[in-house]
Image (spheres, helix red, strand yellow):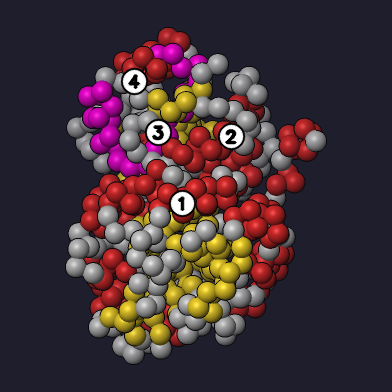
């Protein structure tokens, strides 16, 4: 039986990882800080899927710096990795795939004119490798307002049509982010997630809203979500995520409890 | 000792190279016939389509690969598509012949559940006393992402299976050749243990 996934989202911008509240950023620290002070390498042992988003709001994104900064984190991460941010060509996507991405995450470009390159990515890497990320305010298929460019620009499209559009372009998965719920501790926008699930077969990763164990539980309880995600590094640092997963497993949800202490050969070396 | 990863332009090669770094083992990413022949251990990675076999043949990789498999008899590990290429043919491109190292063909999942099969799923029916499963138990979870499965002709070539509406082989082995439908490099401590066992059996560690 396929296990549900605990996804962890890292929010990167110009050399620094961030906490986000309604898309306003609070700096956490650079790569070294995340490893030394938040014990990311320990934390990553409990992550089923790592998602790293470059949410730089400026136009000129330095892809090389971004990849160099996240390399030390994904080098010790033995699970699927999704990388997103600023993908506006096949070449950028390829650059991410060549540097450790199993999936790439595209947001704004799905809704701009020159989006044909997305078909090319799907052709080459398969739709399971292309995640469509959608940021919205308000609730519901019709009432939600959609935003692109890291939440800066509203577009004239409802959620229903947006889902159809990303399906047509070949996306294999959805990352749905409620800007209203982002980082403010109200839990996921289950209503909208449910409505979206009713009109699509694409698997959904809910994003924005779950900052603690109970809110993650609320997400996985829905039965239509097979993944949950959080980006709240403060609340889950070091062994925090492992404890949370163990609590969810106790509630009967079939998450995998990865156990590195089982690797006898490492312990023997010590 | 040359541990080589064949780059035939598909899939996340970086992650495989990276996984071997966990054991402080340097690997070479190769893409010439000469470097294939020189290999002492070869990893065939891959996501993507069986059709890639045409590119492999165009680049004349098939002959040196057969040499490694049958004559030089070095350890070969195929991952996902890399393992599927061991077969003779595939539903995915009916006229193309695979390496035919392990008897069997690739079938598309014809099931009610969603295809591709994606996620962490269990290994079941582990063959007993296989050193590749040292410290790995039945129901250990590994990461899968695929739409076709290896329909093996000989049961003795199947070391483990996985269930996704139907039961299909998830580890196959024929002499020096072993293949996994899952991605060990994406399967946390379970995958690390699997790779460790592979390295240990072949005296690389």
Looking at the rendered structure, the secondary structure element under dot 2 is helix
Chain of residue at mark 1: A
Highlighted range, magenta: B37-59
Describe the element under mark 3 as helix, strand or loop. Answer: helix
Residue that label 2 marks:
B21
Secondary structure at numbered mark 4: loop
Q: CA distance from mark 3 to mark 4?
A: 17 Å
Measured from the top left, where is residue A144 in percent x and y?
36, 86
Chain name for mark 4 = B
In this rendering, does residue A196 appear at all?
A: no
Co-location on one chain, circles 4 and 2: yes
Q: Is residue B163 above or below residue B17?
A: below
Residue that carries the numbered disc 4 in the rendered image: B32
> CA separation, marks 1 and 4?
31 Å
Question: Which residue carries the number 1 mark?
Answer: A65
Q: Which residue is mark 3?
A: B82
Q: Are marks 3 and 4 in contact (CB under 8 Å)?
A: no
- Residue B169 or residue A20, whichever sits in front: A20
Chain of the residue under label 3: B
Q: Earlier in the sequence, mark 3 or mark 4?
A: 4
User: Which callout, 3 or 4, points to the residue nearer the camera?
Assistant: 4
Using the rendered view, name the quadrant where residue B22 is placed: top right
């Amino acid at each position: 039986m396929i296990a549900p996934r605990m996804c962890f989202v890292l929010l990167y911008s110009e050399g620094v990882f961030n906490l986000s509240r309604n898309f306003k950023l609070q700096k956490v620290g650079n790569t070294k800080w995340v490893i030394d002070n938040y014990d990311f390498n320990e934390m990553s042992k409990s992550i089923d899927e790592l998602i790293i988003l470059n949410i730089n709001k400026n136009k000129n994104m330095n892809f090389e710096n971004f990849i160099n900064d996240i390399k030390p984190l994904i080098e010790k991460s033995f699970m699927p990795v999704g990388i997103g941010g600023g993908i506006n060509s096949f070449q950028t996507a390829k650059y991410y795939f060549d540097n450790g991405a199993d999936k790439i995450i595209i947001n704004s470009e799905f809704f701009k004119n020159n989006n044909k390159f997305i078909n090319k990515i799907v052709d080459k890497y398969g739709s399971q490798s292309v995640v469509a990320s959608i940021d919205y305010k308000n609730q519901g298929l019709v009432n939600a307002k959609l935003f692109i460019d890291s939440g800066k620009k509203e577009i004239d499209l409802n959620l229903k049509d947006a889902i159809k559009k990303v399906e047509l372009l070949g996306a294999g998965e959805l990352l749905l982010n409620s800007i209203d719920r982002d980082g403010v501790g109200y839990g996921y926008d289950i209503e909208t997630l449910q409505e979206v699930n009713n009109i699509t077969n694409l698997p959904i990763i809910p994003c924005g809203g779950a900052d603690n164990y109970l809110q993650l539980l609320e997400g996985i309880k829905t039965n239509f979500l097979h993944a949950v995600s959080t980006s709240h590094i403060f609340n889950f640092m070091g062994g925090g995520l492992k404890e949370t997963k163990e609590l969810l497993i106790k509630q009967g949800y079939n998450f995998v409890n990865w156990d590195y202490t089982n690797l006898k050969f490492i312990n023997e070396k010590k | 000792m040359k541990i080589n990863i064949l780059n035939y332009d598909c899939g996340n090669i970086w992650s495989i190279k990276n996984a071997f770094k966990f054991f402080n083992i340097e690997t070479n990413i190769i893409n010439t016939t000469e470097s294939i022949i020189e290999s002492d251990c070869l990893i065939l990675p891959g996501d993507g389509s069986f059709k890639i076999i045409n590119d492999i043949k165009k680049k004349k990789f098939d002959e040196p690969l057969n040499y490694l498999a049958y004559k030089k008899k070095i350890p070969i590990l195929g991952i996902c598509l890399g393992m599927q290429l061991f077969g003779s043919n595939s539903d995915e491109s009916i006229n193309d012949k695979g390496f035919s190292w392990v008897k069997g063909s690739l079938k598309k999942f014809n099931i009610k559940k969603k295809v591709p099969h994606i996620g962490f799923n269990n290994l079941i029916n582990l063959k007993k006393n296989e050193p590749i499963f040292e410290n790995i138990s039945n129901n250990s979870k590994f990461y899968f992402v695929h739409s076709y499965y290896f329909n093996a002709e000989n049961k003795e070539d199947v070391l483990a299976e996985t269930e996704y509406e139907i039961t299909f082989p998830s580890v196959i082995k024929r002499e020096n050749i072993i293949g996994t439908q899952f991605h060990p490099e994406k399967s946390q401590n379970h995958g690390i243990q699997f790779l460790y066992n592979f390295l240990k059996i072949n005296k690389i560690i």
